[in-house]
Image (cartoon, rainbow, N blue to C red):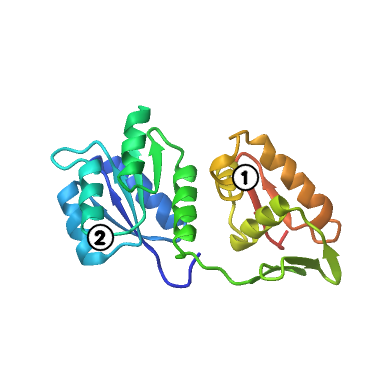
Amino acid sequence: MTETPVTVLVVDDEENIRFLVESALQLAGFTTISAADGRAALRLVTESRPDLIVLDVMMPELDGFEVLQRLRDSGSRCPVILLTARTEIDDRVRGLSSGADDYVVKPFAVAELVARVQLRLQQAGLASTPAVLRCADLELDADSHRVTRSTRQINLSPTEFRLLHFLLVNKGRVLSREQLLIHVWGDDFSRDPSVVDTYISYLRRKVDVDEPKLIRTIRGVGFCVRADR
């Protein structure tokens, strides 16, 4: 995560949804604040200046569309991810055309929402990472696009490089297939989780020729990079 704490405002009139989203974001290393309605959300934006907003659409009085419109009219460029049970394409178009940065439909996978938060923060330049990432004797230099293990240079495809980079950014942390799909393949992926397993296999053939093995499979959860056994 970032060196400076990143604050996410979670806005939803359902307490259980707020608790679920805040808990997941806190586990991912974010600071969270929350609001149960649109007016409280607008007040918190002014008082606390969050770095990103997860905003429910279907709320009484001021709904999410109205909150978003007021934010953009006031000049706020804070990234906003709309969270709603509405699936109609017109609602999605309305939200995105009003200035939302992303749109997640309920019921949602918590890992996907967290991954989308991380992705939008990276795009906003709020999730900077060191140029050189290491795990044991594995080193990735993002500036020179060079990967080495001990003295051996490893040649990776662009997709393999992005996958290894994201694993190393989150060294020691287990990442789900959904998180990896969103971060590595972006909005263009097919949502077929088998592509993650395929590219993990490609990486292992190149990275884990040496000991210790660094790319770990956590059954039923996902993958991580770590040096300890």
Q: Residue furthest left?
A: 61
Residue 84 in view here: no
Q: Left or right: where does residue 215 sit relative to residue 51? A: right
Instruction: Kindly identify which residue carries mark 1.
Output: 222
Write down the quadrant of residue 66 in the picture.
top left
Instruction: Kindly identify which residue carries mark 2.
Output: 75
Q: Return the disc, 2 or 1, that comes first in the chain's sequence.
A: 2
Foreground residue among 79 and 25: 79
Q: Left or right: where does residue 152 sit relative to residue 101? A: right
Image location of residue 97, percent across then percent down:
34, 42
Q: How busy is the neighbourhood of tag 1: few (under 14 within 10 Å), some, or many (20 plus)?
A: some
Image location of residue 29, percent across then percent down:
45, 61
Residue at the image point whose x is 77% and y is 45% from the top = 201
The amino acid type, in three-letter code, at marker 2 is: Gly
> Is disc 1 placed on a helix, strand or loop?
strand
Q: Is residue 73 above or below residue 15?
A: below
The amino acid type, in three-letter code, at marker 1 is: Gly
